[in-house]
Image (spheres, rainbow, N blue to C red):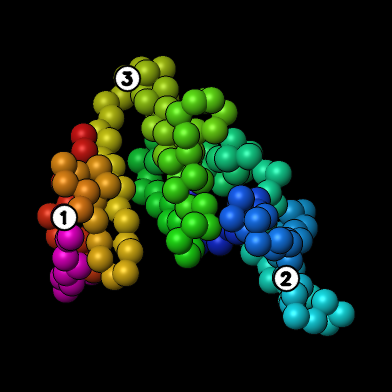
Amino acid sequence: MSESVKVIVRCRPINTREKDLKCKCVVSMNGAKGQCSIVNPADEKAPPKTFTFDGAYFVDSTTENIYADIAYPLVEGVTEGYNGTIFAYGQTGCGKSFSMQGITDPASQRGIIPRAFDHIFETISVTEGCRFLVHASYLEIYNEDVRDLLGKDAKQKLDLKEHPEKGVYVSAVPKVQ
């Protein structure tokens, strides 16, 4: 199991507000190369700025595709006893919640988290001769406040602590088992 950090970028479609404002897409992607290019809308003749990532998914990519490419191998490692983390980062409205949670109906629009839980518990259900213990945390960091999205009070702020041996951790995060 590889322990490297991978950085993936996903471009969401232009939303209704942006369409009403006559915004246009200034992003293009080359998924095969993991490249994202951005045109300066103030100077469209200038060459685009191009950035390379471990993966690049344009607006036509589905969460199902992203899960298969990125999350599936990570979750397979989790079912083999390794730790795994998927960290979604971006400004408000960029699509983090859609990618991570998705929507329930239709099932094709489910996010990475429900797909991962299905994957984990399907693996558990067909594996004989092993016992599994599943711990899960789902945290949001917003404006430097940390909240537990699986907890009883998702508005309760949690504290970051540092331990000389454990390192940095979030205090009082109940692990759902």
Q: Is residue 64 above or below residue 40?
A: above
Whether 145 is among the magenta residues is no
Q: Nearer the viewer, residue 135 or 21?
A: 21
Q: Amino acid at mark 3?
A: Gly
Q: Nearer the viewer, residue 124 or 18?
A: 18
**Which residue is outermost to the front?**
20
For the residues labelled 2 and 3, the Cα–Cα distance comes to 52 Å
Q: Amino acid at mark 1?
A: Gln
Relative placement, left or right, of 93 versus 121 is: right
Question: Residue 75 occupies which quadrant of the picture?
Answer: top left
Q: Where residue 40 sits in the image (x, y, percent)?
A: 74, 77
Which element type, helix, strand or loop, lies under badge 1?
A: loop
Give the residue at x 25% y 33%.
Answer: 133
Which element type, helix, strand or loop, lies under badge 3?
A: loop
**Which residue is outermost to the right?**
45
Give the residue at x 25% y 61%.
Answer: 146
Which element type, helix, strand or loop, lies under badge 2?
A: strand
Q: Is residue 47 above or below residue 154?
A: below
**Within 10 Å of the Cα at label 2, are there few (<14), some (14-19), or many (20+) other Cα atoms?**
some
Q: Amino acid at mark 2?
A: Ile
**Within 10 Å of the Cα at label 1, are there few (<14), some (14-19), or many (20+) other Cα atoms?**
few
If you read the primary sequence from the N terminus, does the residue marked by circle 3 or circle 1 appear first?
3
**Within 10 Å of the Cα at label 3, are there few (<14), some (14-19), or many (20+) other Cα atoms?**
few
Q: Quadrant of the C terminus?
A: top left
Question: Which residue is tagged 3?
Answer: 129
Q: Where residue 136 sits in the image (x, y, percent)?
A: 28, 42
Question: Which residue is tagged 1?
Answer: 156
If you read the primary sequence from the N terminus, does the residue marked by circle 2 or circle 3 appear first?
2
Question: Residue 176 occupies which quadrant of the picture?
Answer: top left
Question: Which residue is tagged 2?
Answer: 38
